[in-house]
Amino acid sequence: MSIAIGTPLKNKALRVLLLGSGELGKELTMELMKLGAEVIACDRYANAPAMQVAHRSHVFDMLDPSALEAVIRHEKPFLIVPEVEAIATDKLIAMEKEGFTVIPTAEATRLTMDREGIRRLASEALELPTARYEFADTYEELVTAGETLGFPLVIKPLMSSSGKGQSVARTPADLAASWTLSQEAGRAGAGRVIAEEFIAFDSEITLLTIRTHDQTLFCDPIGHKQKDGDYIESWQPHPMTDKQLNEAKHIAQRICDRLGGRGLFGVELFLLKDGRVLFSEVSPRPHDTGLVTLFTQTWSEFALHARAILGLPIANIHRHSLGASAAVKATQSFENPVFSGIEDVLLTPGVDLRIFGKPIATKGRRMAVCLATGDTIEGALTKAIHARDTLTIAEG
């Protein structure tokens, strides 16, 4: 397999249409541009992070199939790369049938952006080990799911990211609040939810899995900590037994092979105290917990994704350091966020940061990430957390 990459903004340019322009899309844009691609960034709001570094951008509602089709036909991209969940996936499937290439595939995008589709595929079609679950279209059905699965109960909208709309109902009395949150905070508005039994896991990991045109590769496992369903800290590598790692790779390869296409997948897994490994979720794109690879690997998850989707070879994956990341979140809303404490953060050896450049801040929104290396995971994580606590955000 060979590929020719023309000059950006010329008639032979290799155009990549990025659907979603947040901090992950920004890093991916820069990696694609290093390889000579022309990148067009899209999102529902102006001046999103990836738009600030892309060749050009479009602002529109990506859940609007007509608007999505209009942009695709206008740009005629070599690749369409979804980077968020809120996309009219049926339109992507139609455009793929016309000959456009969707990464990894339009069907994989549809399945992974729908928690019901991916859970049924993993548990029922592939018979991978997962938590027990039920689906609910109404509050009454959620109550029934609680009676079946017991408590605590994890409730998630079928389409969401970064923990939006997700909660844990610890008793039946919590179900009403969980239902309301799921209907108001999901990416696609009110609708069906998945209710899962609460897993008392020992730890949870992300196994970054890369499918090229001829092989499957894995990064070292990334451990992470979440709060309210959203990542706040991650580290690499996460300690696992050989048996656990082999099982994790087996699960990841089976789900990614079934989804098909090429690119990097973030496979989330639970590690149980008894040594078992359970499948949780999969994202067909760089993963927020994988931001740590910006500081631990020669090629970050974004560089690996860029190479894979362009059909370029990946000779090997080299992790050169132990490292950790800590997400910086806004504590309140700011129309003109300004960062302070940067000098103090960068005075510490083995510490770096990425400020995403989001135009506005809302309470709880991820605005930056602090990165650290160390002789131990604990040491790296301590430095990353201290850096996060040193950085402040205020109104400009």
Image (spheres, rainbow, N blue to C red):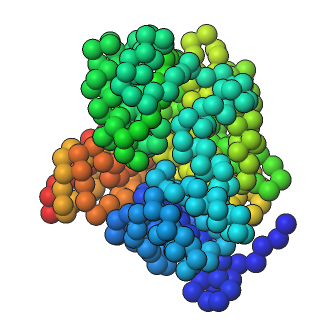
Q: Quadrant of the N terminus?
A: bottom right
Task: Give the x, y percent position of residue 277.
Answer: 64, 21
Q: Quadrant of the C terminus?
A: bottom left
Please name the residue shown 52% across and 74% down the image: 70
The image quadrant of residue 315 is bottom right
Residue 372, how many percent across, how many down?
44, 44
Asked whether, in this view, residue 179 is left or right of residue 310, the answer is left
Q: Is residue 82 visible?
A: yes
Q: Nearer the viewer, residue 192 or 227?
A: 192
Please tell me which residue is depicted at 40% across the width and 22% down the height of the picture. Answer: 142
Q: Residue 132, percent across and down?
A: 56, 18
For residue 15, say whether it is visible: no
Q: Is residue 241 left or right of residue 382?
A: right
Identify whether 165 is placed above or below 314: above
* Residue 319 image point, x, y percent: 63, 45
Tell which of 192 and 111 is nearer to you: 192
